[in-house]
Amino acid sequence: MLGRFEFANPTKIYFGKGAIDSLKGELERYGKTVQLVYGGGSIKKNGIYDEVLFALHAANKAVVEDGGVMPNPTADKLRDGVRIARENRVDFILAVGGGSVCDYAKALSVSVHCGGDPWEVYYERFEEPACPIVPVGCVLTMVGTGSEMNGGAVITNPERKLKIGHVFGSNVMPKFTVLDPTYTFTVPRRQMVAGIYDAFNHVCEQYFSGEDDNVSDDLAEALMRSIVRNSRVAVKDPENYEARSNLMWAASLALNTLIAKGKTTDWEVHMLGQAVGAYTDATHGMTLSAVSLPYYHYILPYGVKKFKRFAVEVWNVPEAGSDEEIALRGLDALDGWMQEIGVSRNLTELGVTPDMIEGIADATRVMDGGYHVLTRPEIVAILRASL
């Protein structure tokens, strides 16, 4: 492994069926007033809301509700959440939902006691919080983003047509997260497979960088194999506890900073996907799946050894032929799996039209940690190949 690194992940995990029983004890460690953050209301239909509220009341908390967090939380929603938090002097933020709800909660946590507009401070100037941070806890109901165990917070500005992620430090990571795989059983199939691909691509973004012998790459390959194997079970039997529990834990491990250690990491697929999301409001995991293969085909010649390893170690492709031929068969196997689980494989079905391409290219950040740093014409070419 190359270079030096630090590793710390302070998020305490309560995993398994009935893990919600641990919520009351955790809440008792924090202040009186809790801002309860959730999405469109599905948790009220499936009973999770009642279980969470029971724990909040058992812990003698005053509850301030902040519902309606959208799948791609906006800057305006964040500003409104800050207003709610300030007016009620909240001591703790509890996010109940998927990755977007967790992202929103973390963005809220660093904004309540800070001056200035949160979008300008954190998503234009990329400043770090210089104020007290309201602690966050999560009860996860959808698998994919890994937001339950990291400091990332993605916010969308529809007026500016920008979707930007800010990865904060360990002081912003959730203090605890409840992971009960049964809470994911009622997620619609399309959302489930989008989350599965999101988790898989998180691993890819860290894997496709560097050529050294790196423990992080061995861990990444194991995670990718597990995600593929369990996804095949879950799409046929969504209430298979073993498969859903493995997917839930793999998604957390995929982006809790562990497998990035000793790596440069890429993240260009996410930059492309987030720019698409800013223009279409499409499901995040589907924007990633729609641009992945054209991007990987484009950069393969620059990182052919790793793509060959990906083919052999993840997809069990026989080592027959040139390195590039083996690598290409690996991408074919990836494509076959994507078709099998039913994720989007082009941008057209997500609402992207040819006239949007130039604007999406302008909104795409260029990263420099992968095998090739894209130019703007190359970004345009990849987006057009994704239509």
Image (spheres, rainbow, N blue to C red):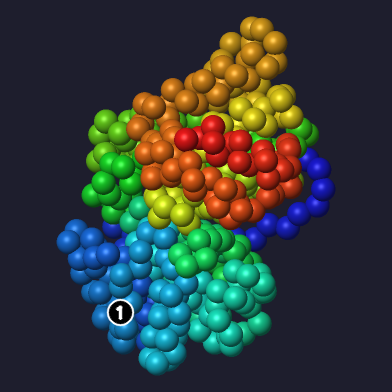
Depicted 38 relative to depicted 247: above or below: below
- The image shows residue 321 at horizontal and vertical percentages of 66, 7
Residue 56 appears left or right of 165: left
Pick the front one: 211 or 13: 211
- The image shows residue 106 at horizontal and vertical percentages of 50, 70
- Callout 1 amino acid: Glu
Residue 379 appears left or right of 286: right
Residue 346 appears left or right of 64: right
Other-residue count near label 1 (Cα within 10 Å), few / some / many at <14 / 14–19 / ≥20: some
Pick the front one: 16 or 292: 292
- Would you identify the image quadrant in which residue 61 lies? bottom left
Residue placed at 30% from the left, 83% from the top?
63
Depicted 50 relative to depicted 361: above or below: below
Residue placed at 44% from the left, 23% from the top?
336
Q: Secondary structure at mark 1?
A: strand
Q: Which residue is mark 1?
A: 65
Quick check: can you spot residue 194? no
Residue placed at 67% from the left, 32% from the top?
299
Quick check: can you spot residue 378? yes
Looking at the rendering, in which quadrant would you find the N terminus?
top right
Taking the view exactly as shown, the residue that stands out farthest to the top is: 320
- The image shows residue 226 at horizontal and vertical percentages of 47, 33
- Would you identify the image quadrant in which residue 313 lies? top right
- The image shows residue 182 at horizontal and vertical percentages of 28, 50
Pick the front one: 124 or 324: 124
Total numbered circles: 1
Residue 144 appears left or right of 64: right
Residue placed at 39% from the left, 43% from the top?
350
Taking the view exactly as shown, the residue that stands out farthest to the front is: 355
